[in-house]
Image (tube, coloured by chain):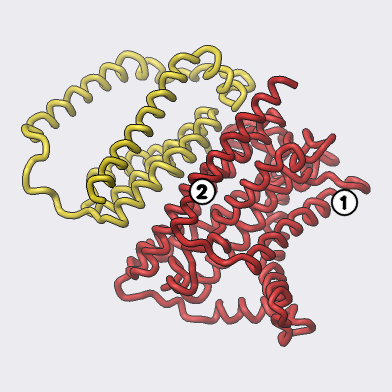
Amino acid sequence: MEEVLFFVSAIGALGGAIGVVAMRNPFYSVLALIVHLFSLAALFLLLASAFVAAAQVVVYAGAVMVLYVFVVAYVGGGGESAWEPIPGQRLLAPALAIALFVELSIAILSSALLALGTEGPEVGPGFGNPEAIGKLLLEKFLIPFEASSILLLLAAIGAIVLAGRKREETA
Amino acid sequence: MLPLGEVGFAEATWIMVVKSLVIFAIIFGILPILTVVERKLIGRFQHRYGPNRVGPFGILQPLADVGKLISKESFRPANAISTLFVLGPLLPVLSGVLALAIIPWGDVQNGVGFYGIDVPIGILYFFAVGSIAFYGLVLGGWSSGSKYSLLGAMRSAAQLISYEVSMGLALLGVVMMAGSLSLVDAVHAQGQVWYIVPQFVGFLIFMLAGFAETNRTPFDMPEADAELVQGFMTEYGGMRFGSFLLVEYMEILVVSGIAAALFLGGWMGPGPSFLDPIWMLVKMFALVFVFIWVRATLPRLRYDQLMGLGWKVLLPLATLNVLVTAILVVVT
């Protein structure tokens, strides 16, 4: 049963990810991304972290993707632009993609493959429940947690500043 | 059983299957009654009788309605996208049924917990499955190939984002006082005083955001019969339209259930413990009555007023409520 769920959600995650880049219509790309995110949430559930799974659905599928759907359905995809918005993009993109691939390969070969055939770590009761995660975030990882929240706050303020300036010019 | 997460109280699989069926059957029995109750009440609010022709006092009206909806043709516009058009009404039903699972109807009695499941992530689960419903509306509206549907879907998207934040923050006060996300724990924590007293601001914000999340008056912008001819539902007919309607009532029940559990003491009430589910139902129906009352009383907000209320009033108020609650919880 676990295996069935794993393969269903793994296929969903991979298929969704491929769909995002393969679909012609941007609306379908967004839908594929949503399938991908829900599959990831199912994988988190299998890893005994219900909180992370719920957070994944609430934050990504429930909030971020809503914005994506909103923009794509309202504005529409439009055609591909005839020029390169960033000069040298066609050369830079594959180079960066290869760099990312190498980086991921190193990570997978050095750690993840070693775990094949083992039972995985033992998790005690209470692992991944809201209390344990709250303690981790506010005690052990307090500084990274606060730093990322300040970063998000700055991004929100920046977005407001950018949007506000545009309105003044048009008015 | 799949080890997908911890539960507050584990039971045999067959008990859980029976529980799911019972909850499903009771709620789906209540839904048609709710439609006739709403029409009757709105009739009374407007000084008319409401439906009174089908059966004694019109109580068979929902049967007639459902019979009509089922026997109608499932029409689909020529430029609609067929698969997504069919998927549209299904997703909200799925979301509503999933959300029913965490509403607590009573405590553990004779080895059976009177709720679908008690998950430690409780309220987060409610928001997670609630986000599925949104895709139903947007897919339905977008795939209909009609501008009214698209406008309705877009309005609902903007509205849901705006009010979901306030809704979550409003519940945070209760979560901090109860010290748990689980709804069952939250009900247990209300032995002394119902949370509607210390968390009255949270309750108001939650109910207001609840009106918006269920697309009810005064926040029924996505449907707006008068200007958008039902918004994302415009092109739907027959039972597909019926399931959108069904979901609206199911969401009202779910929001009332969550509010009753978190603010009105859940199943607690005088009398022996087998009355617990009845008390829960009574509290839920009291809140459903508020939903209907508000619909009959208030006019629809303008779109900018809706956004202004959500972002400039409810969100700061909910944040302030969380801050004050946090300080009080730490001090006491």
Please say if the residues under marks 2 and 1 sit with CB atoms less than 8 Å apart: no
Residue B119 left/right relative to A142: right
Q: Residue furthest right?
A: B271
Q: Earlier along the polypeptide chain: callout 2 or callout 1? A: 1
10 Å neighbourhood of mark 1: few (<14), some, or many (≥20)? some
Numbered circles on residues, count: 2
- In the depicted view, which residue is nearer to us: B91 or B252? B252
Figure colour of chain B: red
Name the residue: 62% across, 63% down.
B249
Name the residue: 72% across, 85% down.
B54
Is residue B139 visible in the rendered image? The answer is yes
Figure colour of chain A: yellow
Q: Amino acid at mark 1?
A: Leu
User: At which x and y percent is residue B163?
Assistant: 52, 48
Residue A29 left/right relative to B116: left
Q: Nearer the viewer, mark 2 or mark 1?
A: 2
Residue B96 left/right relative to B161: right
User: Residue under circle 2?
Assistant: B310
- Give the secondary structure at mark 1: helix
Mark 1 belongs to chain: B
User: At which x and y percent is residue B187?
Assistant: 76, 39
- In the depicted view, which residue is nearer to us: B206 or B269? B206
